Image (cartoon, grey):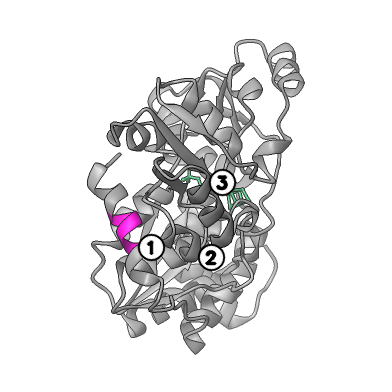
Amino acid sequence: MGAMPADVAEAVRRTAPLYERVKSVIPEIEWATMAVDIDAILRLKKERNAVILAHNYMKPEIFHAIADIRGDSLALAIEASRIDAEVIIMAGVHFMAETVKLLNPSRTVLLPALEAGCSLAESITPKDVRMMRERFPQTPIVTYVNTSAAVKAESDICCTSGNAKKIVESLGVRQVIMIPDEYLAQNVAKQTNVDIVTWKGHCEVHEQFTPEEIEAFRDQNPGVVIAAHPECPPAVVEKCDFAGSTAAMIEWISDKKPERAVLLTECSMSDNVAAMVPQTELIRPCKLCPHMKRVTLANIRASLEYMQHEVTIPAAIAPCARRAVERMIEVGR
Ligand code: 13P
Ligand code: SF4
């Protein structure tokens, strides 16, 4: 690399051990553009007594270099309830920050990109849930964590992709309503005798995968193993070797270390796994979640510098929403 400004050179030197973790997925020249922010974030975390929670879809420089806790929605929710820090930065989307706030009401929870939403969370409102309750008064409502706190507050219990079947069966009833992800609900319905009433919400990333694409991966890459997130349509999941939450997919690949694999999920996760499991060649169909990608080193740094954007939950809904999340955590993974 050519000469660089002294502050950049110093930041590159200080962050060199972190670069070792991601050098297979981030070119050295790009790291030089990131090092100053990374260095500042590490300093600010100490000054603010802050921790950074990062979802598995965060870009490698966030996931591998600055995060304190990484995981799927369930792991982040559970870890959030054990955190001992004044400030929690949620490197993820809005519903995740709300869940963290529900479980940590006395701490400051910051979301670096306030506009980071989720197509599933946007697919249902509290009014919709009340309408379902009226139509099925005897049927418990299981709500995916990818929803607003206001929707959670209308629900009996939450679930994630990592525990959905367990939650549905824990209720000991013949029928449940599972909202809002239609495909997750249909994928769970195939594994249980409980009758599941669905809603028509979809993840804008996972709904793009098709069975034809899976066949093409297999034709072009003999011996490839394919794992899917259960937000994918059932016709896609059926054709895969494994389906599970983002954490379950990572565990599966880390365990099996196949020669070649495809992860049918958000694009950055394959980069994060590639850095962790170098033995496996990851074929990467790049489907980005535009909401997750709003979180950057620059806005994480700004959130620590200016203590923005604080996530709060109205007092009128917080207790009921918290109860739905806590009931889920009591049932466990
Ligand atoms: P996980 O709970 O599996 O991490 O999924 C969250 C999500 O948003 C998937 O699109
Ligand atoms: Fe929502 Fe899909 Fe993005 Fe996950 S990947 S945050 S479900 S839009």
Q: Which residue is mark 1?
A: 321
Q: How many neighbours does mark 2 have within 10 angstroms: few (below 14), some (14-19), or many (20 or more)?
A: many
Name the residue type under label 1: Ala
Q: CA distance from mark 3 to mark 2?
A: 16 Å
Secondary-structure class at tag 1: helix
Q: Where is 310 relative to 29, above or below?
A: below
Secondary-structure class at tag 3: loop
Q: Earlier in the sequence, mark 1 or mark 3?
A: 3
Q: Is residue 75 left or right of residue 206?
A: left
Q: Which residue is mark 3?
A: 180
What's the residue at 58%, 37% (across, down)? 231
Q: Where is 40 relative to 67, above or below?
A: below
Is label 1 in contact with label 3 (beta carbons under 8 Å)? no
Front position in the image: 112 or 102: 102
Front position in the image: 87 or 260: 87
What's the residue at 46%, 31% (across, down)? 244
Q: CA distance from mark 1 to mark 3?
A: 16 Å
Name the residue type under label 3: Pro
Q: Is residue 322 magenta?
A: yes
Q: Which residue is mark 2?
A: 94
Give residue 254's position: percent from left, percent from top: 41, 30
Give residue 221's position: percent from left, percent from top: 69, 16
Give residue 257's position: percent from left, percent from top: 45, 24
Secondary-structure class at tag 2: helix
Query: Extreme bottom residue here?
Result: 306
Give residue 88's position: percent from left, percent from top: 38, 72
Q: In the rendered image, which quarter is residue 152 located in?
A: bottom left
Q: From which residue to which does the magenta span run?
A: 321-326
Q: Earlier in the sequence, mark 1 or mark 2?
A: 2
Is label 1 in contact with label 2 (beta carbons under 8 Å)? no
